[in-house]
């Protein structure tokens, strides 16, 4: 694909978020920053120390040195922010030479840092754009809503990923529609590795050549619908005994209820689990091994990084009818009601028993991936920048 031309006005944009080797929102920020750097000068304000492990339910957001190396002539990365030193917040907000700030908002503990930096840009009469990744918290939190509302008062324009998010911003926070832009979450292509022997990886993970592997990937949290997926898999196994369930992700909650459910259903020998953070450099193993990826979320409002990754790998995908998940598939029958193991089991079984169907689903993921390509997202985002700077 042709590399986009530089913007003639040489826009200089500051972005605020996390970049590798930190975790957090780094996968998204990495793709976004590199794509925007093809069109404008990007100064990325990142963290040296994000926040302490004891306030993070997943056990901390340490470094992951398996991310790809960041290198782009249009991208300058500053890693000076620390959660415990407000002077670093002030320095980034007051000394940045950028004409505007584009902040990535998703995490309550970062509110003080974001509020100070956004205030500094506003004091200097430089506009602030916020991409709101979590309009509402995944777990109920009135504090998140209150502090998000305060932060949003410092913002000139917002970017959201789904139509549902746009309506929530209007109804929950009173944001005017003209201050909202809907730009999709792009694919996470850097996870994909080429020249990989799929059968070797599957063998290493304990799967036979005839197994049909159903992957559930990502942090184990209450809203993810893991219980529904386990119950559904027990039904799938009755009709497709060659199927296997692979659950991989960091625990945010006690695994014991799920273990008891697996044992009660007598399916323990058919379920593989990797209950820890999966380093960026290892993500490809799980998606390469999978025959189908399932997002069985009970509730969700935004777009899914796991879904974006599945699309990057062109994997067959089955989702529930929540948030922006239906946008990741092209067939409505691949969208099932949340919390309905019978419906989920029926669709999974139908797909696994029909190789032609799986092939068509993979081709559909390719169609979705092309719609979520970063060059187009970068163009849309830069259009928002120009609109705000010229206002």
Image (cartoon, rainbow, N blue to C red):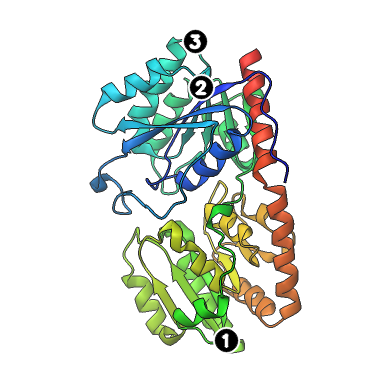
Other-residue count near label 3 (Cα within 10 Å), few / some / many at <14 / 14–19 / ≥20: few
Q: Position of residue 301 (x, y in %)?
A: 55, 47
Residue 316, placed above or below residue 139:
below
Q: Earlier in the sequence, mark 1 or mark 3?
A: 3
Residue 305, placed above or below residue 356:
above
The residue that label 3 is drawn on is 125
Q: Nearer the viewer, residue 158 or 16?
A: 16
Residue 200, placed above or below residue 103:
below
The residue that label 2 is drawn on is 155
**Residue at the image point whose x is 33% and y is 28% from the top:** 112
Other-residue count near label 1 (Cα within 10 Å), few / some / many at <14 / 14–19 / ≥20: few
**Kind of element beneath mark 1:** loop
Residue 329, placed above or below residue 92:
below
> What is the CA distance from the residue labelled 1 to the residue labelled 3?
61 Å
Q: Nearer the viewer, residue 2 or 95?
A: 2
Q: Position of residue 13 (x, y in %)?
A: 53, 24
Q: Is residue 346 visible?
A: yes
Q: Earlier in the sequence, mark 2 or mark 3?
A: 3
Mark 1 or mark 3: which is in front? Answer: 1
Q: Which mark is residue 209?
A: 1
Task: Tell whether label 3 touches label 1 (CB within 8 Å).
Answer: no
Q: Nearer the viewer, residue 88 or 228?
A: 88
Q: Position of residue 212 (x, y in %)?
A: 58, 81
Q: Earlier in the sequence, mark 1 or mark 2?
A: 2
**Kind of element beneath mark 3:** loop
Task: Tell whether label 3 touches label 2 (CB within 8 Å).
Answer: no
Q: Is residue 146 visible?
A: no
261 sits left or right of 327 in the view = left
């Amino acid at each position: 694909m042709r590399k986009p031309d530089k913007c003639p006005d040489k826009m200089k944009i500051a972005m605020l978020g996390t970049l590798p080797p930190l975790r957090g929102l780094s996968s998204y920020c990495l793709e976004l920053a590199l794509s925007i750097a093809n069109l404008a000068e990007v100064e990325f304000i990142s963290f040296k120390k994000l926040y302490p492990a004891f306030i993070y339910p997943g056990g901390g957001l340490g470094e992951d040195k398996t991310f790809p190396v960041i290198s782009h002539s249009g991208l300058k990365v500053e890693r000076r922010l620390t959660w415990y030193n407000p002077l670093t917040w002030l320095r980034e907000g007051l000394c940045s030479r950028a004409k505007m700030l584009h902040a990535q908002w998703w995490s309550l503990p970062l509110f003080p840092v974001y509020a100070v930096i956004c205030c500094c840009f506003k004091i200097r009469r430089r506009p602030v754009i916020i991409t709101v990744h979590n309009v509402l918290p995944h777990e109920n939190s009135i504090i998140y809503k209150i502090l998000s509302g305060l932060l949003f008062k410092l913002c000139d324009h917002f970017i959201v990923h789904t139509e549902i998010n746009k309506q929530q911003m209007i109804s929950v926070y009173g944001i005017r529609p003209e201050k909202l832009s809907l730009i999709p979450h792009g694919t996470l292509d850097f996870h994909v590795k080429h020249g990989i022997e799929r059968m070797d990886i599957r063998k290493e993970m304990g799967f036979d050549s005839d197994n049909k592997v159903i992957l559930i990937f990502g942090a184990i949290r209450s809203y993810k619908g893991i219980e529904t997926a386990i119950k559904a898999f027990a039904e799938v196994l009755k009709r497709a005994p060659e199927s296997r369930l692979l659950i991989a992700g960091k625990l945010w909650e006690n695994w014991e209820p799920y273990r008891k459910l697996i044992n009660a259903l007598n399916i323990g020998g058919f379920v593989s689990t990797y209950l820890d953070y999966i380093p960026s450099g290892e993500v490809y193993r799980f998606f390469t091994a999978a025959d189908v990826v399932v997002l069985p979320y009970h509730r969700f409002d935004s777009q899914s990084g796991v879904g974006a990754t599945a699309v990057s790998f062109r994997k067959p995908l089955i989702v529930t009818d929540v948030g922006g998940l239906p946008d990741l598939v092209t067939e409505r029958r691949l969208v099932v009601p949340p919390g309905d193991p019978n419906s989920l089991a029926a669709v999974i079984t139908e797909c696994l028993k029909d190789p032609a169907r799986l092939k068509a689903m993979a081709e559909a993921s390719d169609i979705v991936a092309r719609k979520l390509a970063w060059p187009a997202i970068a163009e849309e985002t830069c259009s928002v920048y120009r609109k705000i700077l010229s206002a």
